Amino acid sequence: DVKVTQSSRYLVKRTGEKVFLECVQDMDHENMFWYRQDPGLGLRLIYFSYDVKMKEKGDIPEGYSVSREKKERFSLILESASTNQTSMYLCASSFAVLNTGELFFGEGSRLTVL
Amino acid sequence: GESVGLHLPTLSVQEGDNSIINCAYSNSASDYFIWYKQESGKGPQFIIDIRSNMDKRQGQRVTVLLNKTVKHLSLQIAATQPGDSAVYFCAENIWRAKLTFGTGTRLTIIP
């Protein structure tokens, strides 16, 4: 089975702190994604990556950055956390085949910024 | 702007009945659609998908219908069970593997 592992299930940080959310997948997937999930807004794409050291902005990249130094690992970085970044963050991965969009999701990381 | 949306945010269904969850999309270029199920405390899980050259696809107890004329997608769950209680998302694929998700419908199964 595909496994997408997010390093932290729950985090509490203070405004202005730098936050790292880590995600690792074990199926050699080319594509990796970071979404945030908020009630009533569904899942919104923050950043995605099609290959090592490649990154593309999603729909809401402001206030975030990402790093993909290895194929299996995709990190989401909040350079200076703000309260409006309190949310559930979901990492996902998929094969690279065009138009095959099935994503495999991690369990999520719930971040609270005080 | 482009959007993927759901008609109803919540749906309650008697156990054993069939349920239908609807989804509207606005991008006519979308060529691939997926339904996901998210149980409490878990990440979304794939249920079923359909390509734009099809109008119906069946899985185990689930059927997805696609009406491209009115840009409408639906998920039918037959003989609902307590384990079907979850939030259901539709998603559309416009480019490569980038998906746009709807806001979700919470399905509650009444015993």
Image: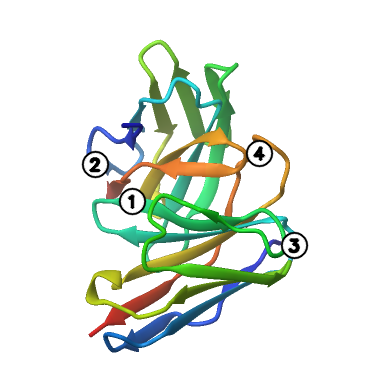
Does A5 appear above or below B30? below
| Among the two numbered marks 4 and 1 on one chain, the one whose residue lies closer to the N terminus | 1
| Among the two numbered marks 3 and 4 on one chain, the one whose residue lies closer to the N terminus | 3
Measured Cα–Cα span from mark 3 to mark 1: 26 Å
Q: Are marks 2 and 3 on the same chain?
A: no
Does A57 appear above or below B68? below
Q: Which amino acid does the dot numbered 3 rest on?
A: Met
Measured Cα–Cα span from mark 3 to mark 4: 15 Å
| Among the two numbered marks 3 and 1 on one chain, the one whose residue lies closer to the N terminus | 3
Does B84 appear above or below A91? above
Does B105 appear above or below A86? above
Instruction: Give the letter of the chain under mark 2.
Output: B
Q: Are marks 1 and 2 on the same chain?
A: no
Instruction: Give the letter of the chain under mark 1.
Output: A
Disc 1: which residue? A42
Q: Secondary structure at mark 2?
A: strand
Horizontal side, residue B16 vs residue B55: left or right: left
Horizontal side, residue B29 vs residue B82: left or right: right
Measured Cα–Cα span from mark 2 to mark 4: 29 Å
Disc 4: which residue? A100
Q: Can residue B86 be spotted in the picture?
A: no
Horizontal side, residue B109 vs residue B43: left or right: left
Measured Cα–Cα span from mark 2 to mark 3: 35 Å
Q: What's the mark number on residue A27?
A: 3
Disc 2: which residue? B11
Measured Cα–Cα span from mark 1 to mark 2: 16 Å
Q: Which amino acid does the dot numbered 1 rest on?
A: Gly
Q: Residue at x 53, y 20 (%)?
A: B56
Q: Residue at x 50, y 22 (%)?
A: B29
List x then y, in percent, for residue A55: 60, 58
